[in-house]
Amino acid sequence: MSRDAHIVRSTAETSIDLSVGHDGGADVRIDTGIGFFDHMLQHVARHGGLEFVLHAQGDLHVDEHHLVEDVGIVLGEALKQALGRKEGLARYGWALVPMDESLVMCAVDLGGRPYLAYGLELKTKKIKEFETELVEEFFRALVNSAEMNLHLRQLDGRNTHHLIEASFKSFARALGQAVALTGRAGVPSTKGVL
């Protein structure tokens, strides 16, 4: 069973080409034109065990919002497509990731019900040119598009960079657990579908 997806999305604001694979992880190439965002997505790929090839362009002369949100949408679509009927998946995953003074917890359910519980308190408004409020926009777009339940909680921390990085890493590790194949037949739900 292939667990790969390739999604292309073009709008008046963005152009995105993304390939994702769950069983490789060797090929990671990311270019959005937003250095900090690229760095966070590299964490998703490496810590989530994903093959991840992304080329995205957007109206960065306006701001970064459209591109960050649309990458979230496309990544969610790719995850949903690659997982198909979700047969044999663990379905749930969680991770607790420290980074210096920061500690972030993430829990994921691939049960088909989109919900984001976002609990980060980011005191710095920007990291270089990246507006930190876009972290929530990215995860909201991803959750809605992938139809996943995602809880992201800040347990400790002050440094905005550390908190965001721990968030992306904890998401990646939780996602890696949730997409793991268990060897069990069928869909991990008493309903018989996800």
Image: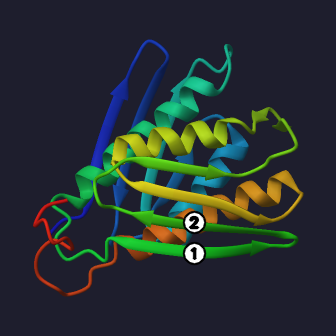
Instruction: Name above or below for residue 10 compared with residue 146.
Output: above
- Report whether 110 appears left or right of 194: right
Q: Which amino acid type is marked by label 1?
A: Ala
Identify the image quadrant of the C terminus. Answer: bottom left
Q: Residue 192 falls in which quadrant of the image?
A: bottom left
Instruction: Name above or below for residue 82 compared with residue 22.
Output: above
Q: Residue 10 falls in which quadrant of the image?
A: top left
- Report whether 140 appears left or right of 166: left
Kindly check if marks 1 and 2 are in contact, taking CB atoms under 8 A apart as contact. yes
- Answer whether residue 26 is visible to the viewer in this image: no
Q: Residue at x 51, y 74 (%)?
A: 94
**Image coordinates for residue 23, horizontal then vertical, percent:** 33, 72
Q: Furthest-front residue in view? A: 190
- Answer whether residue 65 is visible to the viewer in this image: yes
Alpha carbon of mark 1 to alpha carbon of mark 2: how far?
A: 5 Å
- Report whether 27 appears left or right of 129: left
Q: Residues within 10 Å of mark 1 (few under 14, many from 20)?
A: many
Return the residue at label 2.
106
